[in-house]
Image: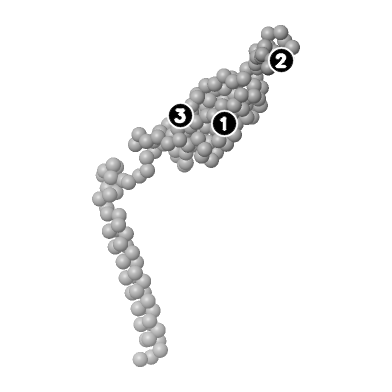
Amino acid sequence: MSALVKRKNGNLMRSVQRIVCHLAILYITMMAFPATANDPEDPDSYNLLPDLVSLTVTPSEAVMLVGEKLQLSLIATYSDGSMRDVTTSDDTFYDPGNDVVEIEETGRIIALSSGTELISARYGWKLNLALVWVDVTVVDPLDTDGDGVPNDVELAPWP
């Protein structure tokens, strides 16, 4: 046999081996994921993760004194009825930066000055995004005589 015929036979054998290998992978894939599990005529047959339906922040409103701290929690509800605490997930809480409150990544807020602040909370991924707001009103401690010292400090009993 000439060298040319041997080379062509060798290339043909490698091509046949590749085709057999691809067919084997296709067969294994079809056995592992049968067509009945993803029937285009039956949307319920698809094995998909549940969709994010809603987010709930608690508390949804808060009145705080300057310096007070409050922990928020964020609960995600899914289409299958399951719920998950996602408070400490990345990029969850956002503060518009009005210097009324400071918000930490853990969802803890610290009242800085008087005013109202809307804090948004987000959790989700592509096409599954929910946005909620927490209304926080920060008030200065009661100071009836106007000297800048809160009443609870002035009226505190001495030890």
Q: Indicate which disc, 1 or 2, sits on the residue closer to the N terminus.
A: 1
Picture quadrant of residue 100: top right
* Separation (CA) of disc 2 from disc 3: 37 Å
Q: Residue at x 68, y 17 (%)?
A: 159
Residue 54 position within the rendered picture, expressed as x and y whole percent measured from the top left: 42, 31
Picture quadrant of residue 111: top right
**Which disc, if any, is residue 108?**
1
Q: Indicate which disc, 2 or 3, sits on the residue closer to the N terminus.
A: 3
Kind of element beneath mark 2:
loop
* Separation (CA) of disc 1 from disc 3: 16 Å
Residue named by callout 2 = 149
Q: Can residue 158 be seen here? A: yes
Q: Point out the frontmost of discs 1 and 3.
A: 1
Residue named by callout 3 = 56
Q: Point out the frontmost of discs 1 and 2.
A: 2
Amino acid type at mark 1:
Arg
Kind of element beneath mark 3:
strand
**Which disc, if any, is residue 144?**
none
* Position of the N terminus by quadrant: bottom left
Q: Can residue 131 be seen here? A: no
Q: Nearer the viewer, residue 131 or 104?
A: 104
Kind of element beneath mark 1:
strand
Q: Nearer the viewer, residue 25 or 69?
A: 69
Residue 154 to residue 58: above or below: above
Residue 45 to residue 146: above or below: below
